[in-house]
Image (cartoon, coloured by chain):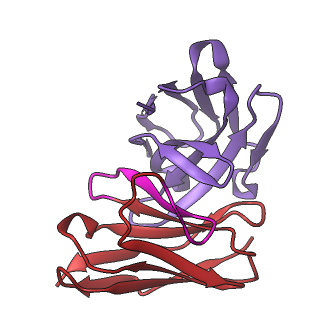
Amino acid sequence: EVQLVESGGSLVQPGGSLKLSCVASGFTFSNYWMDWVRQTPGKSLEWIGEINTDGSKTNYAPSIKDRFTISRDNAKSTLYLQMSNVKSDDTAIYYCTRFDREDFDYWGQGVMVTVSS
Amino acid sequence: DIQMTQSPSSLPASLGERVTISCRASQGISNNLNWYQQKPDGTIKPLIYYTSNLQSGVPSRFSGSGSGTDYSLTISSLEPEDFAMYYCQQDASFPPTFGGGTKLELK
């Protein structure tokens, strides 16, 4: 059974940093592109970025503006999201997702990040 | 970015009813349109990819159609577990974008 389990969410002050993790199981992690998607309170879903299978290529949403970094450790089947210089608008539930050719075919349960002083 | 507009934002319906949710893209997306279901506990599940292809395990009462800029998700006969949020998403152009969501609720 495919599972994606995020962790690392917390309360962080504006301008601070936070690193989210997503541990994958039930499939060959190194064979898939992985993405992060977030959902702000009461709003829709926003794609944040993606990373290719070996971690050599990343793409980000323009709105992120170099503040976030996606990485992966295939030996640990783990995806990461390093968040820096966070703002109140970054308050959201962050989902780890697997991309399979056409769509995001598996999602984690999500982890809450709250940016507040 | 391609803007995705869903309608309606809220859809009251009854068990056994046939419902349709619409999704309009701000420009043509060549059938690169996916649908997702989100339950109240936050769990997100893919339903349909590339306009009309059902994901594995999705009941046949779900169907998708459309072309160009206009797409739709139809549920032929509502079951209790279908009351949830639904989102469309385009994968035709970077960055991928989602619709604002449709809340399907029990009338």
State left or right for residue A2 relative to residue A100.
Answer: left
Could you say which quadrant of the image residue B30 lies in? bottom right
Relative image position of residue B67 (x, y in whole percent):
67, 83
Residue A10 in the magenta stretch? The answer is: no
Task: State the quadrant of the N terminus of chain B.
Answer: bottom right
Relative image position of residue A79 (x, y in whole percent):
60, 28
The foreground one among B32 and A84 is B32
State left or right for residue A27 relative to residue B86.
Answer: right
Say if residue A82 shows up in the picture. yes
Task: State the quadrant of the C terminus of chain B.
Answer: bottom left
Say if residue A88 shows up in the picture. no
Residue B41 in the magenta stretch? The answer is: yes
State left or right for residue B5 relative to residue A11.
Answer: right
- The span picked out in magenta is B39-55
Q: Name above or below for residue B73 compared with residue A99.
A: below
Could you say which quadrant of the image residue A117 lies in? top left
Residue at position x 75%, y 66% from top? B92
Residue at position x 65%, y 18% from top? A73
Q: How many marks?
A: 0
Looking at this view, name the residue that lies furthest to the top.
A75
Q: Name above or below for residue B39 compared with residue A77.
A: below
The foreground one among A6 and A84 is A6
Could you say which quadrant of the image residue B90 lies in? bottom right
The foreground one among A75 and B57 is B57
Relative image position of residue A110 (x, y in whole percent):
41, 42
Q: Which chain is red?
A: B
Q: Which chain is purple?
A: A
